[in-house]
Image: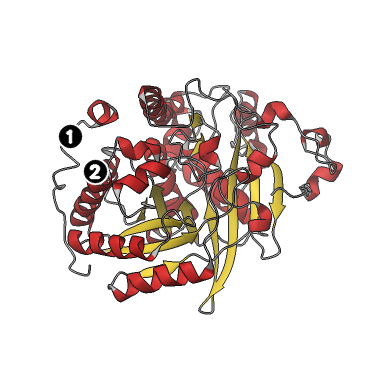
């Protein structure tokens, strides 16, 4: 069973070593807007044209053999294990610091790593800070733009294939409310999505970036557009940070104030790269840790590992159900990581970090949005004595889905019941439906068919 294969500790039934404790408890026609610079670029043919033609080889990602709808099975277990192995291999890729190589990219390296790179590759250590500023502050896209570095050094690195490592924006789509989704084309021609969501709440302007952590996702949640596609690979820290930089550039240099790991993929299957990306976003891009949210549907051992980094980011657990039966129906992996186990792990996470847990709860009409479901959820959270917050998310329709969006009355009733039971609750504002902003939807619109086995 998945549990026995992946659960290497007694994490689900015991608490972490506490560090501190707190007592507060559609299809529609998709018209692609090219980058302004592309109009005069020789590589114009790389972009989809205005009559919706595009390179199917780029967006049609091979689906992992064995990924099928239905109950969680051994094939799913093996794919999850493969994803975890892939994450560790990608995170260990900094060995390329020892010498320039044809695939060396500088984006994704910390200031200290850039200093090591500089010292080992023909220049003084202090150049590392200059390189960092060029990459993360000035946003240069080529080695030759680093004009503070000696020209002969830049030419040498450029000739050896050292690059900044920025990815191409393959296509974009915007909604009237300003929400903008970008499709990012990676070095291996795979596509991931990132979304910029501007808002003005309580007189404060914000720009939230929703980032992807994997190409696809192996968790197969029934209501998720990405989950219908399968899994290809994890993203590196560079590929994650690049999404935030691309959104800032798309919004005219406006600073991203909040980052949420709620795009394509399961972040907790890619822990080392997600953690490094989070640290880069904090230290090099300047986004506060408490303005970064990491979302997970639940992977055994992952919350314990995340807690060990002692980061002050927000943990958002995709619960989506008040009990095991319903959760297993919409989240196949819940068969391996039970409802009760994940709640116990959330209690342990809070005890170890002092950070309350946010529960994401997607409301699906007639499935988990009834008043009895709200009452049951409130009772469960009360019983666990868990400092938490529930974020209700009215379902974003996905093509060919069996699920429907709940009525406003059902949403209001659910929220009211939780609040009456002293459960802090918010309802996520629907943004960017016109931009197909639910994760996986825009990319799916570019595919002949979902990732075919």
Residue 107 shows in this picture: no
Circle 1 crowding by C-alpha within 10 Å: few under 14, some 14–19, many from 20: few
- Please give the count of numbered marks on the rendered protein: 2
Label located before the other in sequence (1 or 2)? 1
Element carrying mark 2: helix
Quarter where residue 445 is shown:
top right
Side of 228 where 448 appears, left or right: right
x and y percent of residue 67 in the render?
Answer: 48, 26
Left or right placement of residue 8 versus residue 440 in this view: left
Q: In this view, does 108 lie above or below 67?
A: below
- Give residue 452's position: percent from left, percent from top: 60, 25
Label 2 packing within 10 angstroms: few (<14), some (14-19), many (20+): many
Looking at this view, is 315 or 168 the one in front? Answer: 315
Is disc 1 placed on a helix, strand or loop?
Answer: loop
What x and y, as percent, mark residue 118?
A: 48, 34
Q: How is the image coloured?
A: secondary structure
Which residue corresponds to the image point at 66% horizontal and 59% vertical from the top-left?
251
Residue closest to the far bottom = 203
Disc 1 from disc 2: Cα separation: 9 Å
Residue at the spot of label 2: 304
Look at the image and tell me in which quarter the N terminus lies.
Answer: top left
Residue 139 to residue 49: above or below: below
C-beta proximity under 8 Å, tags 1 and 2: yes
Q: Give how far across and how far down residue 317 sits, in percent.
A: 35, 51
Q: Which residue is drawn at 55% across and 25% down?
A: 63
Q: In this view, does 184 lie above or below 451?
A: below
Q: Is residue 423 visible?
A: yes
Residue linked to disc 1: 9
């Amino acid at each position: 069973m998945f549990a026995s294969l992946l659960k290497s500790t007694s994490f689900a039934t015991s608490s972490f070593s506490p560090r501190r404790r707190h007592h507060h408890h559609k299809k529609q026609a998709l018209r692609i807007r090219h980058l302004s610079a592309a109009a005069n670029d020789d590589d114009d043919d790389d972009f989809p044209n205005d009559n919706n033609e595009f390179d199917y080889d780029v967006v049609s990602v091979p689906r992992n053999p064995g990924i099928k709808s239905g109950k969680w099975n051994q094939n799913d277990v093996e794919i999850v294990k493969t994803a975890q192995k892939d994450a560790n291999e990608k995170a260990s890729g900094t060995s390329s610091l020892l010498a320039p190589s044809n695939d060396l990219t500088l984006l994704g390296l910390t200031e200290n790593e850039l200093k090591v790179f500089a010292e080992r590759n023909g220049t003084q250590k202090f150049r590392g800070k200059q390189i960092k500023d060029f990459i993360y502050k000035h946003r240069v896209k080529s080695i030759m733009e680093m004009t503070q570095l000696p020209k002969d050094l830049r030419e040498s690195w450029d000739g050896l294939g050292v690059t900044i490592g920025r990815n191409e924006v393959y296509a974009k789509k915007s909604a009237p409310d300003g929400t903008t989704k970008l499709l990012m084309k990676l070095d291996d021609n795979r596509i991931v999505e990132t979304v910029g969501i501007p808002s003005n709440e309580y007189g404060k302007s914000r720009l939230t970036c929703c980032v992807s952590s994997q190409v696809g996702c192996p968790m197969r949640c029934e209501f998720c557009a990405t989950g219908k596609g399968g899994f290809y690979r994890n993203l590196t820290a560079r590929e994650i940070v690049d999404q935030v930089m691309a959104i800032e550039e798309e919004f005219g240099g406006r600073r991203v104030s909040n980052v949420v790991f709620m795009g394509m993929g399961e972040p907790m299957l890619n822990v080392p790269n997600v953690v490094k990306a989070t640290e880069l976003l904090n230290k090099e891009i300047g986004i506060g840790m408490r303005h970064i949210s990491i979302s997970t549907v639940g992977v055994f051992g992952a919350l314990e590992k995340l807690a060990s980094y002692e980061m002050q980011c927000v943990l958002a657990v995709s619960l989506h159900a008040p009990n095991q039966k319903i959760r297993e129906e919409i989240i196949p992996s819940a068969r391996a990581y039970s409802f009760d186990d994940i709640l116990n792990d959330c209690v342990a996470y809070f005890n170890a970090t002092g950070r309350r847990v946010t529960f994401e709860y997607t409301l699906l009409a007639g499935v988990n949005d009834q008043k009895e479901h709200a009452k049951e959820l409130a009772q469960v959270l009360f019983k666990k004595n868990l400092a938490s917050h529930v974020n209700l998310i009215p379902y974003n329709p996905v093509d060919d889905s069996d699920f429907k969006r709940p009525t406003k009355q059902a949403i209001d009733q659910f929220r009211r019941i939780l609040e009456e039971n002293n459960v802090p609750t918010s309802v996520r504002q629907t943004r960017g439906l016109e931009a197909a902003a639910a994760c996986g939807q825009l990319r799916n619109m570019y595919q002949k068919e979902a990732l075919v086995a």
